[in-house]
Structures are given as structure tokens and as C-alpha cells.
Image: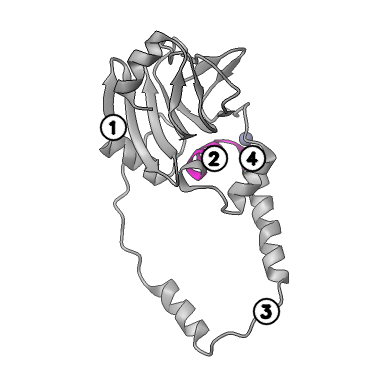
Amino acid sequence: MTPSHHPSHALLIDHAAGNLAAGQAFVVAAHVSACAACRGEVELAEAVGGALLADLTPADMAPDALARALARIERPTPAKASPPVRPDWIIVPPDVLEAAHKRRRWAAPGVWVAPVAKGPGDLRTYLLRVGAGMSVPRHTHRGSEMVCVLKGAFVDGDHTYRPGDFAYSDAEIEHRPEVTSDGECVCLFAARGALIPRDWVGRVFQPFVRI
Ligand SMILES: [Zn+2]
């Protein structure tokens, strides 16, 4: 399935240039793995960035620079046991799968949370699973929030977000996303600051879910 909601061009360029925090890069990478159009944009931006670097005036290198570079390439990297893939999810970075397997915590009936990364600053990256037909209490955000759907679908206003879809929210947006009745929905979030609940359900929900 081709995603229909994409990151901005500026965000894709920041991603290609390595300017995003790790957690934000995980969210964009998850979308890019599912979206051929954005993958093309990222590859183009990387190629342009590489060409710009290649144009820089070469600096004198230390006499042993080549030997050191080769030694670094040949050094075997310790094998990191990668967690099993989730065949029912879109492709995600290994750190995200690892979080799902090792740090998943049921926070409320039908809801689990798994922290993926913390920082820098107040940025928090986490997985959130919400059961079929449930809605996240009405809330707004203190800062930016990026999300990519890994499995299932949710409805937010006039839009339905399906696997691979990307959404960006900020303090301007107040919403109450609702998971479709088809099945559970798992999303990857990178959010600055905690949510601000806008109804009593949210105020009850937040201390348990801690997002
Ligand atoms: Zn895309």
C-alpha cells in the first residue's frame, strides 16, 4: 500500500543530511521504508549532499590516514542479535523492534507503550498500541509531534492514517484520534513535551500511559 500522508520536503532533507535527532529519524525512516516517493527524495538529497562534499577542496591527509581508514573498515563489528521482525508491521529500524520486545508495558486496557529513545531535551520517542475502535482522549501538544503508523489505522478529523502514513502535529492542533474498528493500531511517535489533556478522560488516562 502506498502511504498518502508524507513528511514535508524540508523534513526529508533534514533526514538525508543527518540533522534529525535519533528518535525523529526513526519515525521518518519508518515512513521512508514504506514510501517509494519519499525514498527517492531522500536518495536524491543524499546524492546532492555527497556531491557538495566531493566539491570541497581536499585537505592534506596524515600519511597513515588510508591505513587507519582501512583498519576501521576491516574491524569486525560485534554481531548484535536483532529482534525478530514483525511481519504485520511496516519495516522499522532495529532499535524500534527491540523496544517493542523488551520495554513494552500495558498502561491501560487495550493500550501498551514502549519507550524507544529519550532526548535530546524533552524529546521522547515511543511506540503506542491502541486497541480497535478506541480513541486517544482529546489533547493538544506542548511541542512538535511526529508519528508514523506501523500497523492498523486511525482516523483524525477528515483523514484516515494507514500503515506508513506520517503525521505532524504541534501546539496549534487539538485532536482526538480514533483507531478504526478493523484491528489494533501501533504507531511510532517522536514528541517534544508531554501531551496536554483537554478532557477528563485524558486527565485520568495520562498518569497511566505517561505520554
Ligand atoms: Zn512519503
The amino acid type, in three-letter code, at marker 4 is Cys
Select label 4 or label 3 by which is in front: 3
The amino acid type, in three-letter code, at marker 2 is Val
Mark 2: which secondary structure?
Answer: helix
Magenta residues span 25-40
Residue at disc 3, CB closer than 8 Å to ligand 1 = no
The amino acid type, in three-letter code, at marker 3 is Pro
Image quadrant, ligand 1: top right
Crowd around label 1: few <14 · some 14–19 · many ≥20 (10 Å): some
Q: Are marks 1 and 3 in contact (CB under 8 Å)?
A: no
Q: Judge left or right: residue 120 versus residue 113.
A: right
Select label 2 or label 4 by which is in front: 2
Residue at disc 1, CB closer than 8 Å to ligand 1 = no
Mark 4: which secondary structure?
Answer: helix
Sooner in the amino-acid sequence: mark 2 or mark 4: 2
Tag shown at residue 104: 1
Residue 27 placed where, x, y %? 50, 38
Tag shown at residue 38: 4
Most frequent secondary structure within the magenta stretch: helix
Sooner in the amino-acid sequence: mark 1 or mark 3: 3
Which image quadrant: the N terminus? top right
Report the residue marked by disc 2.
28
Q: Quadrant of residue 76?
A: bottom left
State how far apart marks 1 and 3 are (Cα). Answer: 48 Å
Crowd around label 4: few <14 · some 14–19 · many ≥20 (10 Å): many
Q: Judge left or right: residue 63 versus residue 101.
A: right
Select label 4 or label 1 by which is in front: 1
Sooner in the amino-acid sequence: mark 4 or mark 3: 4
Residue 50 placed where, x, y %? 66, 62
